[in-house]
Image (cartoon, helix red, strand yellow):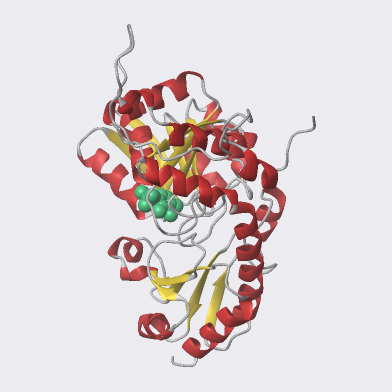
Amino acid sequence: MTPLHPESIAVHAGRPAPTAKAPLNVGIELSATFHHGPDDNYYLRHETHAGIRALEQALGELEGGDALVFSSGMAATTAVIEGLLPVGSVVVTGWTQYTGSTVLLGEQERLGRLTVRSVATDDTAAVLAALDGASLLWLETPSNPMLAIVDLPVLVEAAHAAGAIVVVDSTFNTPLVLRPLDYGADIVMHSATKYLAGHSDLLMGALITRGGELGTALRARRDLTGALPGGLETYLALRGLRTLPLRMERAQSNAMELATRLSSHPAVSRVRYPGLESDPFHARASQLHAGFGAMISFDVRGGADAATRVCESVRLISHATSLGGVESLIERRAMHAMDAARDVPASLLRFSVGIEHVEDLWDDLSQALRQV
Ligand SMILES: *Cc1c(COP(=O)(O)O)cnc(C)c1O
């Protein structure tokens, strides 16, 4: 049989075997402990539950590797940063990226465990110059919230030549837009809280590897720390994953249309969206990605106050942090001190485009932009 398309994998992977009277869905298992067998020692932290195994099957097939799910994106990140790297390791990572990753790495550096070299990861030469002696290259593409896209194949090759493994936080992409393992990355990280689960109702993380020693080490770390999602979370996440391709299709087409309209709006000074031909990352995204995602960052004329007024004026769109759900969210990122300190413009709004009707979203944005 020819391999299935991701749209079909998302619907069918991780289901029970189709035997007579078997259910189509894996149920919600809620037990932390199990009766002993003759020589085994069953316990949830080590054995996981059926919902985890079903979700990992589906996510692994979508990313083209072996998936491990965690209780949050940050739990997955922690397993890599604290679980894999010996004291004294050098990590090369992005200057402007997801705050939690930056804080975790900074804390490890302050504790004397790691050396962190922060660079603009979309600047290939800057990354290459920083790789000497590094053990790990942590990339986020597109980056939060600047939506910079890295030249992944070139960076992977250079990192491997320097002896470093490559981790890609692919939360903004989903496997429908980019499969980093296909470009040679060693670990794909997701905050499954976002697009994969897609309904803003749970926390979850994932790491996908090619298995082997890396997969075993990360799994051992998860077993030890117990950073596992519960049965209700995995049930909801797998249900959400079933419609990921449909949700992404709509969210991306909405984002393309809204980015285009925003770029000629008089109250907007700049739009960052790789789907726009004028975007500095358009060529790279067109070459490497299978889509442009559904995150837009745009700058409002009139600075922080004007941008804040837009956030306070939206009615259909929610003024909230996070992203990747069915509903559209907007936020002024520089309200967070870490983003402000890392060169995020004061008037930049990060807009997670949902699956509503595009004209309703545009009406709401237009009336909010009239308030500035
Ligand atoms: C949200 C997010 C995380 C952290 O994930 P949690 O599930 O909230 O722990 C990491 N990276 C990116 C890009 C994110 O958006």
Residue drawn where x is 38% and y is 33% of the image: 80
Q: Is residue 50 left or right of residue 223?
A: right
Residue drawn where x is 61% and y is 35% of the image: 61
Q: Nearer the viewer, residue 17 or 221?
A: 17
Q: Is residue 172 left or right of residue 32?
A: right
Using the image, determine if residue 48 lies above or below residue 206: above
Residue 290, horizontal then vertical, whole percent = 69, 51
Residue 304, horizontal then vertical, whole percent = 37, 80
- Does residue 251 appear anywhere in the picture? yes
Q: Is residue 371 left or right of residue 282?
A: left
Give the position of the C terminus as an image quadrant: bottom left
Residue lying furthest right: 1
Using the image, determine if residue 318 lies above or below residue 37: below
Using the image, determine if residue 80 lies above or below residue 331: above
Residue 75, horizontal then vertical, whole percent = 34, 40
- Does residue 95 appear anywhere in the picture? no
Q: Nearer the viewer, residue 369 or 1?
A: 1
Give the position of the N terminus as an image quadrant: top right
Total numbered badges shown on the rendered structure: 0
Residue lying furthest front: 21
